[in-house]
Image (cartoon, rainbow, N blue to C red):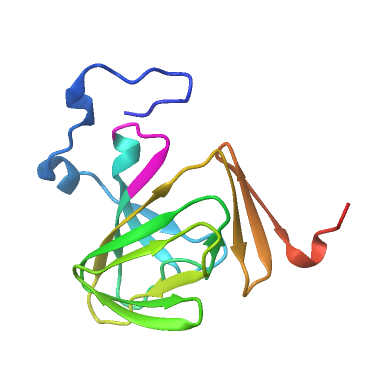
Amino acid sequence: MMTTPDQQPRKDTQAYVLTKSDIDNTPETKHVHQFNEHAIRHTVSLSDIVGLTKFGLHLVRVAAGDETTTHHYHEESDEFIYVLSGELSLRYGDEHYQLSAGDFVGFPAHGAAHSMRNDSDADATYLMGGSRPPIDITLYPEIKRKMYTIHGKKEYVDMEDLGEI
């Protein structure tokens, strides 16, 4: 069930309940990062299924050897991950961390750039969540790029092409 900002939430509470069986039987969506062909996530967007619009929560699986994203941070959106299974190598700012089941990481807006990679020989799964502000800017410092998300529409610009007014 999806809602748009002008729709009212349904009063039928069953539409907001996902059982383990519902989740297990929901096909994953394969996401290849728009700026990194090695960043491949297999995702079930739990929040989208139940129509949440202000907050995103996704069940993510990353295969062995794959990355999760391009090193980045958001200017307006807080994010987090909670590792459910497997191991992930986290690069967070200038630091490196090895994550495993039960580990939690918060990525505040305007925080350090972050990215993960599955360096193990088994899949890793985690919950990824965050706020969904109507306008956000994502910075990719290593590729010198900014992506603007405005009411769901995404555009990007390379930093060298930005001009001052």
The residue closer to the viewer here, 76 or 41, is: 76
Quadrant occupied by the N terminus: top left
Picture mark count: 0
Instruction: Give the image location of residue 138, x and y in percent.
Output: 59, 57
Farthest right residue in view: 165
- Occupied quadrant, residue 63: bottom left
Question: Which residue is at a point 55% across and 50% down the rendered structure image?
Answer: 76
Image position of 55 (left or right of 141): left
**Residue 38 visible in image:** no
The answer, for residue 152, to whether it is visible in the render is yes
> Is residue 165 magenta-colored?
no
Seen in the picture, residue 162 relative to 11 is either above or below; the reply is below
Q: Residue at x 18, y 45 (%)?
A: 23
Q: In the figure, 92 relative to 159: above or below?
A: below
Camera-side residue: 101 or 107? 107
Residue at 33% in and 47% down = 57
Residue range of the region highlighted in magenta in the rendering? 50-57
Q: Where is residue 36 in the image (x, y as percent from the top left)?
A: 53, 68
* Place of residue 106 in the rendered image (x, y in percent of width and height, measured from the top left): 38, 62
- Residue 131, position in %: x, y? 43, 46
